[in-house]
Image: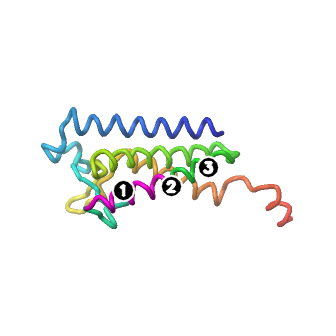
Amino acid sequence: MVRLGWLIALCALVLDRISKWWIMDVLELPKIQMVKILPIFNLQWAENRGVSFSMFSTDGDLGRWALVGLTALIAIGLGIWLKSVQTRVLAIALGLVIGGAVGNIYDRAVFGFVADFLQFHVGDWSFAIFNVADSCITVGAVLLIWDSFFGPRSEKESSDQG
């Protein structure tokens, strides 16, 4: 399961980096700011200097590197947890979160912000602008919650209830 988790993390990181390379260097979205794709979907450039949904935005280097450090510690902790997982769902979930976190760490360390560009909207209402790494983290978190409610129970838990 450890190999599966690290493979998923690597795939998430590679997909995130390829998408950001294409958006930033090929399409040059930072220069054009927005591309309308569908009536409910745009590519919209945003520089996220905070954490999720730009909360706790930081403009200085201290905040930037504090977020890099905190995110790295969380990713390391999840990597340690990954060593002990017994199910595919948990390995995939942790891999997605680790890969997404490392993708955003890279952005913050290299650029000073996380590059966001995927925007869903209906009329004037818009969901938060996000990226592939954020999507991986979100899907991984949902899988972690799913596993906590519906995943296999340990033998000790089963015998305590029976």
Q: Which residue is mark 3?
A: 80
Q: Give, as a three-letter code, the residue at label 1.
A: Trp
The magenta stretch spans residue 116: no
Q: Give, as a three-letter code, the residue at label 2.
A: Leu
Q: Tell me the magenta residue range.
A: 60-72
Coordinates of residue 35 in the picture (x, y in percent): 18, 43
Coordinates of residue 74 in the picture (x, y in percent): 51, 55
Residue, far top: 26
Residues at marks 3 and 2, CA–CA distance in whole angstroms: 11 Å
Q: Nearer the viewer, residue 14 or 128?
A: 14
Q: Which mark is residue 65?
A: 1
Along the polypeptide, which appears first: circle 3 or circle 1? 1
Q: Give, as a three-letter code, the residue at label 3.
A: Ile
Specify whether 45 is left or right of 153: left
Q: Residues within 10 Å of mark 1 (few under 14, many from 20)?
A: some
Q: Nearer the viewer, residue 21 or 35?
A: 21
Q: Which residue is mark 2?
A: 73
Seen at 31% across and 45% down, the residue is: 110
Residue, far left: 32
Residues at marks 1 and 2, CA–CA distance in whole angstroms: 12 Å
Along the polypeptide, which appears first: circle 3 or circle 2? 2
Q: Nearer the viewer, residue 158 or 86?
A: 86
The magenta stretch spans residue 62: yes
- Mark toward the viewer: 3 or 1: 1
Q: Please identify the dominant SS of the magenta region.
A: helix
Image: 71 above or below 91: below
Q: How is the image coloured?
A: rainbow
Q: Quarter of the image holding residue 24?
A: top left
Specify whether 99 is left or right of 160: left
Q: What is the quadrant of the N terminus in the image?
A: top right
